[in-house]
Amino acid sequence: MVIIQNETIANVPVLHVVKEERKNETLPLIMFVHGFTSAKEHNLHFGYLLAEAGYRVILPDALYHGEREQNLTAQQLQLSFWNIVVQTIREIEQIKGELCERNLVEKDRIGIAGTSMGGIVTFGALAVYPWIKAAVSLMGSPRYGAFFDAQVEMAKKMQLSIPMTAEQLQKERARLTRYDLSLQPEKLQDRPLMMWHGKRDQVVPYQYTYEFYEQIKPLYEKGRLKFISDNEAGHKVTREAFLETVKWFVEHV
């Protein structure tokens, strides 16, 4: 039987999903990060299927989301987007560290996945953590700089107030360079990576992900890189996408 435990790991509220009879064993780990304005509970279907397949699954709440909500306005939350992304990348390692200390994780069998903002986090984590064995990004963007620029341009078009000077914006963009895989694709080191994106996505540009896929294809051996394009999907993960996610981890972690 699969059980769901509401816990705090490394000071982060998480849902811990695992088969009850194996909860104290050393198991392969999958961490799944939710999207912007979502919460950990919204991805329990991933947690259940992965736990059924024999993995320990951790679904964390990102900063200002779920149990960590702080009643920010929509604009305040939007302005915190990249801080949330970077903080979540840091917390992924802290959660992994605590679980490893408790001997609950096979250290060479750890996967990361996420939807939308969680997919962006996944790409950033791949740029800085060589311990990730395989990853799946669902409608995320690996091109941090380009997506940052697009967000700024969109805010200007909508005549929204940006409480930052041009110099501050440039500094914020520069801070993200460390996590931008499109600038350092060699960091992937042939680690299994699956990407899914809907062509009609109006939130996270499809082109950023597909162009990145074309960029890194020459770096990969056959079978270790996959891009699933959905001609009809917008910014919503399909059932096919999450079933393919489970299959990917079963094959590669």
Image: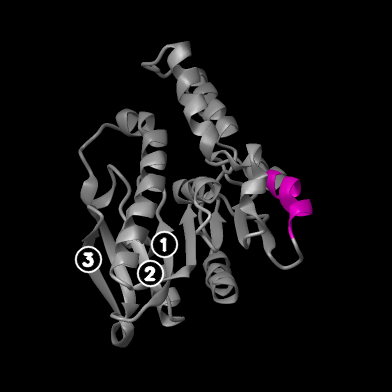
Asked if 77 appears above or below 108 in the picture, the reply is: above
Q: Secondary structure at mark 1?
A: strand
Check if mark 2's residue and mark 1's residue have beta carbons within 8 Å. yes
Inspect the magenta stretch and tell me whether residue 79 lies in it. Answer: no
Q: Amino acid at mark 1?
A: Met
Question: Which residue is labeled 2 in the image?
Answer: 57
- Could you say where residue 125 lies in the image, as x and y percent from the top left? 49, 49
Which mark sits nearer the N-terminus, 3 or 1? 3
Q: Secondary structure at mark 3?
A: strand
Q: Residue at x 41, y 19 (%)?
A: 160
Question: Which residue is labeled 1 in the image?
Answer: 31
- Could you say where residue 211 lies in the image, as x and y percent from the top left? 71, 43
Structural distance between the alpha carbons of marks 3 and 1: 15 Å
Which mark sits nearer the N-terminus, 3 or 2? 3
Magenta: predominant secondary structure element? Answer: helix
Asked if 10 appears above or below 147 in the picture, the reply is: below
Which of these two is toward me, 41 or 171?
Answer: 171
User: In front: mark 3 or mark 1?
Assistant: 1
Quarter of the image for the C terminus: give it: bottom right
Quarter of the image for the N terminus: give it: bottom left
- Residue 13 has which mark? none
Question: Which residue is labeled 3 in the image?
Answer: 6
Q: Secondary structure at mark 2?
A: strand
Q: Which residues are magenta?
A: 212-220
Asked if 55 appears above or below 178 in the picture, the reply is: below
- Could you say where residue 231 lies in the image, as x and y percent from the top left? 68, 55
**Number of residues whose C-alpha sits closer than 10 Å to that of mark 3, classed few (under 14), some (14–19) or many (20 or more):** few
Q: Residue at x 45, y 50 (%)?
A: 118
Check if mark 3's residue and mark 2's residue have beta carbons within 8 Å. no
Q: Amino acid at mark 3?
A: Asn
